[in-house]
Amino acid sequence: MSSDSTISIVWIYPDLLSTYGDRGNLLILARRAALRGLPVQTMEVRSDQALPTTADIYLLGGGEDGPQALAAQRLIADRGLHRAVAQGSVVFAVCAGYQLLGGSFFAKGTQYHGLDLLDFRSDRGPARAVGELGGPIDPRLGLPPLTGFENHGGRTHLGTGVSPLARVTTGVGNDGATEGAWRGKLLGTYSHGPALSRNPALADLLLRWATGYDTLPPLDDTWADRLRAERMAATAVS
Ligand code: GLN
């Protein structure tokens, strides 16, 4: 956090990476911080602008293949996200944005370099994965199960330097067995929804990573809990 304790949050490339309501993740983080009286500054940085290198949280959303490839080229040329990660910023990335954090990914049949920030690579699966996605999250993160919606053609193969975010009980995620990845304060998922509206505890984890606070005051999550319960019941294996 900056010296005046303001949490700065950057939405990366709204012009390229903002499918399936992922920008809602920015609104949710800002709202959950503000409800705790934590000052927040949000910023949307278009792909023709340089990324700030010292923000607290960076968010990446989903994107179609073409915009995803362009985003990769611009982020690699910019290096701002690499600098931010090196100085300890939090990164939360969804779908195309998640794939971008790895070593490589496929878009429109061509392999592209990723940002090489996490140890995984993505290729294409036999069929597009579309539908509900969920499962228990890595117990070290202390979170309730993940619930979300996925829509992607890529599959992601994790290396040894990264941990899966969750085990898949509904949907496909990385490969039908695991979903998402995390290491340090970098976390990626295939979950849209937007992810943080369906997983408020995950939003709070990102805020705790950004602030260094061990706990945050609880909020009234009645509506989010109802949504979670409804979605989990709808996908429960009978
Ligand atoms: N273009 C990527 C894929 O299909 C990501 C899609 C998305 O972000 N929804 O795998």
Image (cartoon, grey):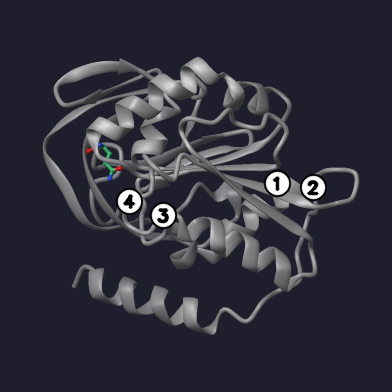
**Residue carrying label 3:** 22
**Residue carrying label 2:** 212
**Residue carrying label 1:** 209
**Residue carrying label 4:** 19
The x, y position of residue 120, in whole percent, is: 40, 23
Can residue 21 be seen here? yes
Which is closer to the viewer, label 3 or label 2?
3
Is there a contact, CB below 8 Å, between mark 4 and mark 3?
yes
Label whose residue precedes the other's in the sequence (1 or 3):
3
- Where residue 52 sits, quadrant-wise, is top right
**Relative side of 89 to 17, left or right:** right
Q: Secondary structure at mark 3?
A: loop
Mark 4 CB lies closer than 8 A to ligand 1 = yes
> Residue at horizontal 47%, vertical 18%?
76
Label whose residue precedes the other's in the sequence (3 or 2):
3
Label whose residue precedes the other's in the sequence (2 or 4):
4
Q: Quadrant of the N terminus?
A: top right
